[in-house]
Image (tube, rainbow, N blue to C red):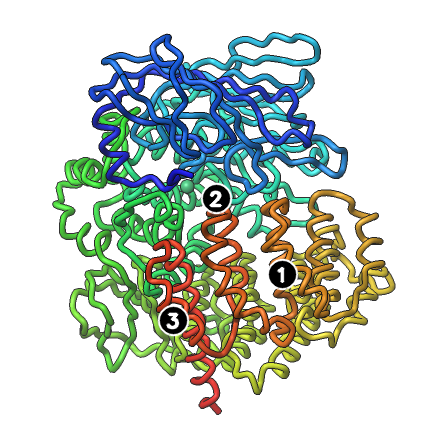
Amino acid sequence: MGDPNLTRDETSRRAATISVHSYLVELDLAAADDHDLPGFATTTTLAFSASAPDTWLDFLGDSVEAVTINGESVAVQFDGARIALTGLRAENVVTVAATGRYSRSGEGLHRFRDPADGATYLYTQYEPADARRVFAGFEQPDLKAPFTFVVGAPEAWTVVSNQVAAQRSTNGGVQTVRFEPTVAISTYITAIVVGPYHFVESNWSRDELNVPLQVLCRASLANYLDADAIFEVTKQGLDFYADNFDYPYPFGKYDQVFVPEYNLGAMENPGCVTFTEAYVFRGAATQAQFEGRANTILHEMAHMWFGDLVTMRWWDDLWLKESFADYMGAEASSVATRFTDAWVAFANRRKAWAYLQDQLPTTHPIVADITDLEAAKLNFDGITYAKGASVLKQLVAYVGRDAFFEGCRRYFRAHAFGNTTLDDLLTELSATSGRDLTAWARAWLQTSGVSTLALEDNVIVQTDPRPHRLAVGCYDFDDEGRLVLSGRTEVDLVAARTPIELPDAALVLLNDADLTYAKVRLDERSLRTVESSLDRLADPLARGLIWSALWNATRDGELGVQRYLRIVRDFAPAEANSALLSSALANAVAAVEHYVPKSELAAARHDWLDATWTSLTEAEPGSDAQLAWARALSAAASTDAGRSSEIRALLDGETVLEGLPLDPDLRWLLWSALAATGHANVDDLDAELVRDDTAAGRTFRLRCLRARPDAEVKQNAWEAVFADTSLSNDHLDATIAGFRAGGRRDLIADYDGQYFASLRRVWSERSIEIARRIVLGLFPGSDSVEPVDEWLAGNGDASAALRRLVVEQRDHLTREIRVRAFNRSVV
Ligand SMILES: [Zn+2]
């Protein structure tokens, strides 16, 4: 098979010789509900100019039946990834008739059968380069063109694409829908959604512009779809962007579709945004979950301008759209919706992702060097999104909000329907701010790594010096015992050491207000104040920064893990911000499993389990906290069976915790815990499936079955991961999660050798999405990096993307070993 890994150089050369006028893509999905048929007919007709006689089209499918160039049928030259085109003229019309394959990995045209009602649902997901799994084309972001889609499908189904339908005809139970041509867009944001989707309609208008809105999901989830809440945020976002961008929404209508077995949070297909179904809440959801969904809605909407209207030339500048959308997700949430605390979750959770990634040996500048598609695929990471957004937030503070938005408006007007690089944005921002941004870009966009800031004897010390605008907050107790801001000093840091005069204070917080991007340490006195009084601090952003500082110090082996866990046990029960609570609870489990010395592990698991049980039973009935603690209990109970009878009593209804909604998802989480400790059998799980025979229920059941602590179960799970290529993306995840459940290293350590022996085969035989899940999900949590180093030494010629994943896992393991050693020395 030909190489599906396109490089920057070859696509750049292709773009220099090709200019695409239009695509007509015809897809025959009339028999899509017959799952015995693996493929579908796809025909592409492209009109384009060419300044060279030869080029190629990208296609990853079963076969190519016919190629016509300028009216003449030519011999098919298809190597499995590319279709060679020869004898081109200045102007060409090329038609390719081919057979594509339905996807089960979430890449390309994904097909899913709903076990609740047997209905079939399809949707596409392409970024960065999977449109070629559905139709032949020039798969690169800078060859934009208008697309016309024609889709054949069963008559009763909903058929949605980027544009509205222009014509619909029916014949013998089959409908053929021809959509209006799109404006010029890149291949990776085209989209088709087909199936008996449930939909709700609304609309938004401003002046002359009317935008029809739809929200869609599977019919079996219709009861759970809170379309009004989704429309509310959608309209608030459209208002916000209309006010701030001053460029009318360019794509006509705006559909938002919640799709099954989705590989990511959401995708910004213009006019047809797709989202994970995890955002259709089947049971109780916390404020943090609603806030996260609003943030994603607004992130994707920002892409309509940044990414879709103006698109990066190649994946090096992926950050141009992702940093911007990430920034806007939080900014629009905090300004235009009820989620006014959006920057708190950003400071605490989103930036944690960036700090983590930025300390790996594979970290990279925000403006990355992406030489090919495999590298592009791995670059949807914490640097591109969260560090980029943090740095944009700094830039807004630096040039001012007005200059920033005015720069954006000029950028949209100058580059609408085109492609750009970093310089194009900096040109506009420099013009509106009157500042030369070259030095800023060099310091923040073209370097990698994160500084650590600490206060030592009235000097702010920073590792890895960079220019920062920093606020230092001093907090003291007021007459009622509350910890309140008593003074804030802003200071510009440039060098490694910056002297600062501060008043005496119980708590000094570096990076107060979260102006910059840096890890900060608490001095010993401030740490003691936190240990006695974190709950006295009313400001959620300050608490979020403190929770972050504590977690970073724990991960770095500077704060003892038992001291960290004590703070979580003492103050998480009082944490009023739902996003901060859920991240503190997730970090606590990670701290127990990764950073506690092995000799103390059993006791630490037991203490944490008891803390979750106690906090659950003491939480206010019906509160977010009660739900968050119930989820934390299920995680803790999967490694310690000490509360299995209490959990069983909850599931059986013998114990009722007032206000706690035992919805299907929470019930399955509790079953997962029982299964992992050997306290749930197949009959229990089958009975639960009778209560919840849905797609989610079946996935949970599979995970529970694979979680049982039994050597044969693990053997079967292992074989399924490697041999059962019919497993969908979600079922593969469930199998891997089950295999690893319970922290039972004794049951799975024997597979370490097979893991390393299989890596290259997995990488070459499976799609990158599936291979990545296997490589990360099954990486051995052993006590030694020796086998990893052996593999790296013997596989210097393996794919750079595969090596990157292994090197990152090695770094996590090295950190665990180092931090556990540090904690052995802490008394
Ligand atoms: Zn995005």
Q: At x 40% / y 35%, what residue is drawn?
A: 302
Side (left or right) of 750 relative to 827: right
Measured as percent of width and height from the top left, residue 767 is found at 49, 45
Which dot marks residue 390? none
First in sequence: mark 2 vs mark 3:
2
Q: Badge 2 is on which residue?
A: 295
Which image quadrant: the N terminus? top left
Q: Amino acid at mark 3?
A: Tyr
**Up-down: is 423 above or below 438?**
above
Q: CA distance from mark 2 to mark 3?
A: 30 Å
Q: At x 48% / y 54%, what residue is drawn?
A: 761
Crowding at mark 2 (Cα within 10 Å: few <14, some 14-19, many 20+): many
Q: Badge 3 is on which residue?
A: 475
**Up-down: is 580 above or below 103?**
below
Q: Badge 1 is on which residue?
A: 718
Measured as percent of width and height from the top left, residue 357 is found at 38, 60
Q: Secondary structure at mark 1?
A: helix
Q: Amino acid at mark 1?
A: Trp
Q: CA distance from mark 1 to mark 2?
A: 37 Å
First in sequence: mark 1 vs mark 2:
2
**Up-down: is 664 above or below 640?**
above
Q: Is residue 182 visible?
A: no
Side (left or right) of 468 relative to 717: left
**Foreground: disc 2 or disc 3:** 2
Q: Nearer the viewer, residue 308 or 816?
A: 816
- Residue 735 sits in which quadrant? bottom right
